[in-house]
Amino acid sequence: LPFAPFLARALEFCRLPGRMASFEEAVRTPRACVERPSLVWSSVGFEIAVPSPPKKGASSAERIVESFGRTQKRWTPLLRNVSGAVYGGDLMAIMGPSGSGKTTLLHVLAQRLGNTKTSRVSGSILLNGKPPDKTSRRQCAFVFQDEIMMSNISVRDTIRFSALLRMPSSTPRDELEAKVSDTIVELGLQRCADTLVGGAARRGVSGGEKKRTAIAAELVANPHLLFLDEPTSGLDAATALGLGATLKRIALSKKDLLIISAIHQPRLKLFELFTKICLLRHGRMQYLGSQEGAVENLEATIGITMPPRVSPPDWMLDVLTEIDLALLQNPREDEDGGPQDSLPQEGDALNGSVVEDEKDDVATGGGHTDAESGFQHGVTFKQAKRLSHLLEEAALKNAERDAAKPSPYEDDAADKDCVKKADACANSSWWQFKILLQRQALQQRGEIFSQVYIFQILAVAVIASLVWLQSEDVGDILGVLFFVNIQQSFNTINGVLKVFPPERQLMLRERDAGAYRTFPYFMAKSLSDFSSIFLFPVIYAVVIYFAVGLRDGADRFFTFVVLFLLAIIVAQSIGLVIGAYVPDIALANSINFVLVLLIMLFGGFYVDVDNIPNFLAWIRYLSFMFWSYSGMVVNEFEDRNIDCDDAREGEFSDNCRDEASAEEQAQGFNGNEVIEALSFQDAEIYQSCVVLVGMTVFYRILAYLCLRYRWSINGK
């Protein structure tokens, strides 16, 4: 059996003396010391850099050349002058039409977007009365719209591993298990607690249960802030309402937790669960305040009345959408702020505009409404511009009033120190390695012992054994040696590319949340990967070795197995590099296809290495297939006596030509002549093993660097 689960279990009882114990004591901080968190942001903006457009009138060829050499950038704003404040016990919804900046604002507030070469953040954000720093991310929990979790781990284990990684390592185990159980009950996951999460290839929990599991995995660590990106997306109305009610209950019961959720267009009952609303349009804030006063505030600001029998959230989004459609007449003015004379002046009630006229029409029930917004004849660009500025001005005033509330930490030095200690809470790399190894072992156990994987390994082994059963022909033996290498190696690469890109995304999210560092994750991943190839691949190699009747001798057999396993480990490492550098699965498979062809062509089987052109001959040294195949050929044929009946006439030795004497033909030939015919006369078994180990180390380090520094083909 793979030894990773047993090693992980053994590591639970291992502790580094002295320094580790003092470290755990230093980082353990009671959660109860934080009373009511606050998050205040002022004049927040976010911009991304996009390449400057090509020159007008340029030809297609000029556009292509310019796209490669273009260095100028222009900054496109996604958020503009957004302000607000939320406190513990609040449940705030960020609403707006598609593309309004809801998710962007959520990521900026959660410190998941910052200043880079292609993006920049402006304004100020205060967490608990002070600017957030790198370690304050551990106070912020973030639930993504596309929740990614280990598919072969149960709901309970998913929450337990999150607690083990994020809570102090010195937390008593019974206390931790009680916290996990309480969180399961709190999120209503009792019925599916022991069900696997599941994924595309394996049936698991439902969409609503998976969403609640993702929330539970964040809440179990007692965060101060919980951010949710479209938590009801993909859920039916009843499930979405149940999830909203759960969040409302949590917000009311925990005054030391504030919840901010981006949500597109909730139904009325779900909308009424929120305590505070933030409306965005094209990155601009159009309303900030209580949920109860949202409709009244908008009606008073823009001078129209919500039509009867219309849902308030639908009406608010219809108003913003109609303003957006009107502003599309001149999108550049909307983006740049527009001319100053288009702004409403003090005491100007839109100066007899359509808004005042329609206010009377709606009251008398006359006219036709567009999109049930209350605007009876649509809105012109100038009117939409004025309405947008009125809404933004009113929202900013509300934000200033909320921000003026005293912070719970403003005058309490003890609380400030308490929060600072909580920020420093982190577990050691050794502890993280132990927990991650246990989690990785559970995940890979499900992959290794899946029926599909077992059938694939054994079916190919049986078919190959039957095709080459007890074959003594030299050409057939060379064929089976190359087949064994290529089939399992590239099956391993494809397997890694199928599962690692999503796991990479999960790792980056958890690392950004401060759950663990890159190095312990990568060491746990590597050790678990190595252990996963020792069961069925070895069975595969053993079955084929004895079924084909390869060379006798224990030393020859174990050399064959070592070379076979080293080739698989190198292939696995290459798959990690591709998966880490190319997050897109389709593009990764395309790159893998080209790479497979190169490795095969220069592996020494299809083309004699001496027949490769000199300017391409060096590529064979980069092909791990060349080293594993050449080592297996030497292991099989070195100093071995072969009958002429086992080779084609004159293919390897003059003794086997038709014109040779009967005595020469009976003598046969030496296996070293096969090695020389393949141009492997300089190959050494130990050399092949050393090079394959070196390739493994090189590719593993490269994969680690891609993860550590976020190197990727798209620059993210």
Image (cartoon, helix red, strand yellow):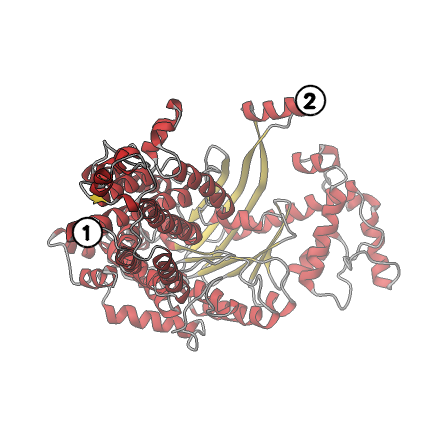
Could you tell me residue 376's position as x and y percent?
A: 84, 55
Residue 275 quadrant: bottom right
Could you tell me residue 61's position as x and y percent?
A: 64, 23
Q: Which label number is shown at residue 558?
A: 1
Foreground mark, 2 or 1? 1
Residue at 34 percent across and 67 percent down: it is: 157
Q: Which label number is shown at residue 58?
A: 2
In front here: 665 or 376?
665
Could you tell me residue 365's position as x and y percent?
A: 86, 64
Q: First in sequence: mark 2 or mark 1? A: 2
The three-letter amino acid code for the residue at tag 2 is Ala
| Residue 101 vertical placement versus 222 (above, below) | above
| Residue 192 vertical placement versus 58 (above, below) | below
Q: Residue furthest bottom?
A: 191
In front here: 78 or 204?
204
Left or right for 17, reference 108: left
Q: Is residue 173 visible?
A: yes
Report crowding for label 1: few under 14, some 14 to 19, many 20 or more residues within 10 A (C-alpha): few
